[in-house]
Image: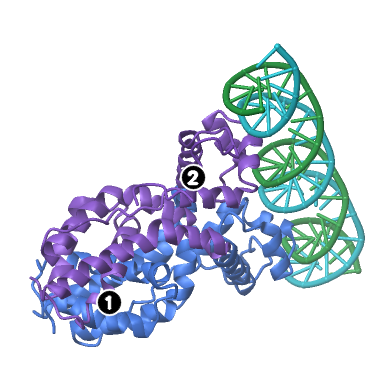
Chain colours: A blue, B purple, C cyan, D green
Amino acid sequence: MTSQAADGPESVTASRRSKLTPEREQEFFDAVLEQIRECGYDAVTMEGVAASTRCSKSTLYRQWRTKPQFVVAALRSRRRSRLAGIDTGSLAGDLREAARAAGRWSTTDTKLLQALGHAVTQDEELACALREALIDPEIAALREILRRGVDRGEIRADHPALEYIPAQMFGVVRARPVVDGTYADEDYLLRFVEAAVLPALGLT
Amino acid sequence: MTSQAADGPESVTASRRSKLTPEREQEFFDAVLEQIRECGYDAVTMEGVAASTRCSKSTLYRQWRTKPQFVVAALRSRRRSRLAGIDTGSLAGDLREAARAAGRWSTTDTKLLQALGHAVTQDEELACALREALIDPEIAALREILRRGVDRGEIRADHPALEYIPAQMFGVVRARPVVDGTYADEDYLLRFVEAAVLPALGLT
DNA sequence: CACCATCGATACGAGGTCGTACCGATACGA
DNA sequence: TCGTATCGGTACGACCTCGTATCGATGGTG
């Protein structure tokens, strides 16, 4: 569970399909995601990614047949949660910690989500990859935090506000750039949790 | 303040810059906004708009010099608030009514906001137009609702949750498609207000 | 009734991207 | 050491879109 869950013993003599090292592959993935964040999905070009990583277009097209498949591969490469592993012992503490973690990544992830938000409605496979990379892991981590709070008896399992916690967290992170013209940082999200989330849950 | 604030007496003999009736212009605007919702900003083509309205590209380029300017004009044409004019006499009632109104328009407006969300980071004028068309009027309407609640003494002016109401409303509307895969309808938003917003404000 | 601006239609050049094909160079395995 | 597959580089064809230019038709104006 460290970084890459290999699908078998690919270490020794088993001929790799490519001479590219995993580090080199990750450079391509990082480059295309960064270019998506800055230019948007439609405006990303294979040529631009090739230039920024000093590889050739041929290499990209050899490894990943098309631009959509390349982007999907890049998304799958960063399937990991920002909110996993949080456990402070209390529901309020976990939510505060989640706010901090979300704030640390909000600029990067919000840009990516925004840039892919519409492309995702046109390409089902892209939508899956995005959900698996950025959405589902965070929702699962939040639900886990809430579940533990219920288990500890801090809150009733049928508290009506529980259902909306994930949407609220995603929501303010995505909405703040639109409403305030600036990304949601740690401080903002922490104050939000303090002022709106915890009171709604009856935890203050 | 009914619909279009004309910039002068353009009624009688003053030769119009164009033979197009305002209704015809609105057809163009509706068409391009609809095409943006469906295809995304980058993928919209002047040719497509011309085809869907059975006019010629020449006409579009004659009236609006470029595609960005055309889109900006289309956005400015629908500068009106979904939430304006709400006044039920109580803060809770107003917020419930706002949820209903937001739910009625969430699909249309969320698609547009999503489709333009990234283009807006590349074109400052487009960003202004979008804010003036879809964002600022709604925020102002919400602030007005909250201000009246304060004036009536239903809530203290410095209640910490007040600041986050606009971001929360925009947030869940934008986040639900991502979290639940479906748009936020009236029922969902109403339950959200009931379960999360009103409790956070101490209005049960 | 004659004029003329705008209409819709279409052709066009410029620019850009996709994805393929071909090239010499190089690193790895036999 | 030799063969081979992948590397980076580049040229290419197909396609699309922008924005301009040109055309005949038409409807309002003097």
Indicate which disc residue B9 carries.
Answer: 2
Vertical side of A11 occupied by B7: above or below: above
**Amino acid at pointer 2:** Pro
Inter-mark Cα distance, 2 to 1:
42 Å
**Is there CB contact under 8 Å for labels 2 and 1?**
no
Vertical side of B157 occupied by A126: above or below: above
Vertical side of A192 occupied by B187: above or below: above
Closer to viewer: mark 2 or mark 1: 2
| Rendered location of residue A182, percent (x, y) | 44, 75
- Which SS class for mark 1? helix
Instruction: Say whether residue B183 is left or right of residue B112.
Output: left
Instruction: Say whether residue D25 is left or right of residue B108.
Output: right
- Disc on the earlier residue, 2 or 1: 2
Does residue A4 show up?
A: no
**Amino acid at pointer 1:** Glu
| Rendered location of residue B203, percent (x, y) | 9, 72
What residue is at 61 percent from the left and 45 percent from the top?
B64
Viewport quadrant of the C terminus of chain B: bottom left
| Rendered location of residue B110, percent (x, y) | 37, 53
Q: Quadrant of residue D27?
A: top right
Pointer 2 indicates a residue of which chain? B
Q: Residue beneath label 1, please?
A: B163
In the foreground, B95 or C25:
B95
Indicate which disc residue B17 carries.
Answer: none
Instruction: Say whether residue A191 is left or right of residue B71.
Output: left
Dot 2 alpha-carbon crowd within 10 angstroms: few under 14, some 14 to 19, many 20 or more: few
Pointer 1 indicates a residue of which chain? B
Does residue A26 show up?
A: yes
- Which SS class for mark 2? loop
| Rendered location of residue B7, percent (x, y) | 49, 51
**Disc 2 and disc 1 on one polypeptide chain:** yes
